[in-house]
Amino acid sequence: MAGTLIARKLKFRRHFAARLSICGDGILDIARGEQCEGSIGCSPGEVCTGCVCVANQGTTTTTSYVPSSTTSSSSSSTTSSSTSTTTTTTQAPTTTTTATAAPTTSTTTTQDPTTTTVTSTTTSEPSTTSTTSTTITTSTSTTTTQAPTTTTITSTTTMQPPTTSTTASTTTTSQAPTTTTTSTTTTTTLPGTCTGACPIHTVFLILMENHDWSSIRGSQSAPYINDILLPIASHAEQYYNPPGVHPSEPNYLWLEAGTNFGVRNDKPPARNHQSTASHLVNLLDAAGLSWRAYEEGISGIDCPLSNVGLYDVDHDPFVFFDDVTQKNNSQAPRCIEHVRPYSELQTDLINDTVARYNFITPHLCHDMHDACAPLSDPVLQGDTWLSTEVPNILTSPAYADNGALFILWDEAVTGDGPIGMIVLSPKAKGGGYQNTIPYTHSSTLRTIEEIFGVTPMLGDAANATDLSDLFVSFP
């Protein structure tokens, strides 16, 4: 065996002569698959290849360290995610085998590149991994776009001279622009509806007849007023009819217009009709606010311009104005539309179709004007009627929705009063509250104008004190 090895060495030396030198341990048996081991014996500028020192041809091997193409990005938006694409190209090394058999034979085996692409989606803090590659690869470029918020582009480039591999990775993350959404809420408040501190919405006004407050307050004939209403209501102790204004009719006119127009009798509209347009219901119509007079004892098929049964026309102020009655036309549409039988009130309360301003006139047996059988006591008759009818108002939706009920008397029997003024409302002070502020019908008219926000103040209403002290909040 030793002789064979020595013979092989001598043979290599003679073959390559002076230009070659044996390196390593000098053992080479290609047929048996032996390889030289070690690197002993080569001069500077030479490399040991196949147990033979070969002059270095100036090949330089450079290994560049660059970040790997595994990159994870995290968008600042909590709803965005980054997509990272990793491209790994594995190139089997090129193997060159040189044999010493007669003319030099070179065999080159090249393996096709194997490319594996792995795509992963993560949400994490950005990180970078650097990888040193020594493979020989052709350039591969992979682009992945994540819609709608993140675009990630990964490019892998392999550059060659031989034995040199450079891998470059570029990651671009595009952040979608921030979108701000503005939400606008529009609230439509229907007339008479609101939230918070709402104004008075619906007004009911009941007119009683011809009694001083002293004949009502504490009277045994008025148990409903004294025992039921006053403890839950607010009332005035110093309310008067306008100075010297009598009998009833001029006081009703005053509540509508702030003046009696010089009328001092109870003549019908044919005699005392007024041509002026300066009165309350015209202001309400102009403002788009509904109004209605509920008159007990009328039919509703015509405009009631005269006394019929227990209906007393001088207790119905609206039929004294020409713009309501078309100058005493019993078929005047505006009159028939707005001056309705009292019997319709109950249905309107149930259906919540009452007007914003509701003027209520009981007939002569119910308004304390006449003594009628079987009771034959005007105060008791009126008190009994109130005990039957007022609860219908107080339990209605219109009243509950910041309604206000005013119960007052038209005039005093002795002088100008005091006469009664009782206020019930969810917004009234109530609880039996009373004051001694001087009021007149001008105060009531001013109060109604303020509740509905209509102007100008009519007649003496411009000079009056309103009834706001009887309320917790007003209007």
Image: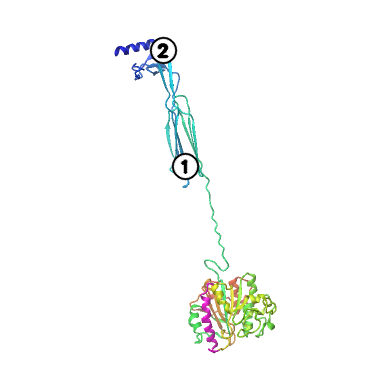
The residue type indicated by label 1 comes to Ser
Can the viewer see residue 336 in this picture?
Answer: yes
What kind of secondary structure does the magenta stretch mostly adopt?
Answer: helix
Q: What's the CA distance linking mark 2 and mark 1? A: 61 Å
Within the image, what quadrant is residue 254 found in? bottom right
Residue 235 point in image, percent of width and height: 53, 79
Residue 69 point in image, percent of width and height: 45, 35
Horizontal relation, residue 117 to residue 352: left or right: left
Q: Nearer the viewer, residue 217 or 275?
A: 275
Query: Looking at the rendering, in which quadrant would you find the N terminus?
Result: top left
Can the viewer see residue 278 in this picture?
Answer: no
Q: Nearer the viewer, residue 371 or 132?
A: 371
Q: Residues within 10 Å of mark 1 (few under 14, many from 20)?
A: many
Up the image or down, 348 lies above or below 182; here it is: below
Q: Which residue is label 1 attached to?
A: 82
Q: Which mark is residue 102?
A: 2
Q: Nearer the viewer, mark 2 or mark 1?
A: 2
Q: Nearer the viewer, residue 471 or 101?
A: 101
The residue type indicated by label 2 comes to Ala
Up the image or down, 378 lies above or below 71; here it is: below
Question: Upstream in the sequence, badge 2 or badge 1?
Answer: 1
Whether the residues at callouts 2 and 1 have beta carbons within 8 Å, the answer is no
The residue drawn where x is 54% and y is 55% is 183
The residue drawn where x is 54% and y is 58% is 185
Residue 147 point in image, percent of width and height: 51, 43
Q: Residues within 10 Å of mark 2 (few under 14, many from 20)?
A: few
The magenta stretch is 373-397
Horizontal relation, residue 432 to residue 324: left or right: left
Within the image, what quadrant is residue 213 found in? bottom right
Q: Judging from the image, what secondary structure is the residue with disc 1 in?
A: strand
Up the image or down, 268 lies above or below 52; here it is: below
